[in-house]
Amino acid sequence: MWHFFSKHRVHESLVVAVLVATSLSFHAAWILNLLVVRLDSVRLFMTFLPLVGPVSGMYTCLFGFFVVSFLILSLYFKGRDVSMWRKPLFGFFLFSLFSFFIMTLPFVYAFSMMVE
């Protein structure tokens, strides 16, 4: 039963699928965070648990987005040679991580301008 966790190697296609799914989830997270802050209708829609607020809906949606994108990408990458995609996809992951941290800073997503 526990033989999956004792493997010394993981297939490269699964690793690439997790990397891309995580990167896409980071982008979806900062976009969803921006929408929750800016639009009251999205904030109300994302509030699954009133005690927690819209964060409960955001985490649930992001987890679902990660699972769906991982399943689609793992089926797409299954049995393919993805060794040439390692570096570019790791760069995409680092870019996604950096943009997530920058775009979720309060002074960035709460910035607004009034034009008269």
Image (spheres, rainbow, N blue to C red):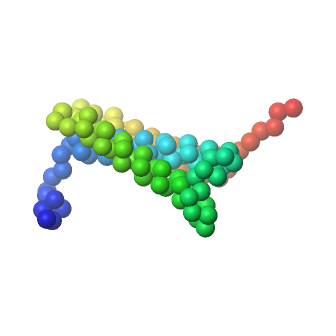
Question: Farthest residue in the right direction?
Answer: 116
- Is residue 52 depicted above or below 65 in this figure? below
Q: Residue at x 31, y 39 (%)?
A: 72
Give the image location of residue 12, x and y in percent.
Answer: 20, 43
- Is residue 7 depicted above or below 17 in this figure? below
**Residue 57 seen:** yes
Q: Which residue is drawn at 14% across and 56% down?
A: 8
**Quarter the C terminus occupies:** top right
Q: Which of 103 and 27 is in front in this view?
A: 27
Q: How many marks?
A: 0
Does residue 96 appear left or right of residue 87 in this picture? right
Quarter of the view holding residue 35: top right
Does residue 95 appear left or right of residue 87 in this picture? right
Q: Residue at x 38, y 38 (%)?
A: 91
**Quarter the N terminus occupies:** bottom left
Does residue 51 appear left or right of residue 99 in this picture? right
**Residue 97 seen:** no
Question: Farthest residue in the bottom direction?
Answer: 51
Q: Which of 84 and 14 is in front in this view?
A: 14
Q: Which of 62 and 81 is in front in this view?
A: 62
- Is residue 72 depicted above or below 59 in this figure? above
Does residue 16 appear left or right of residue 26 in this picture? left
Give the image location of residue 65, x and y in percent.
Answer: 42, 46
Q: Residue at x 69, y 48 (%)?
A: 40
Give the image location of residue 31, x and y in percent.
Answer: 56, 42
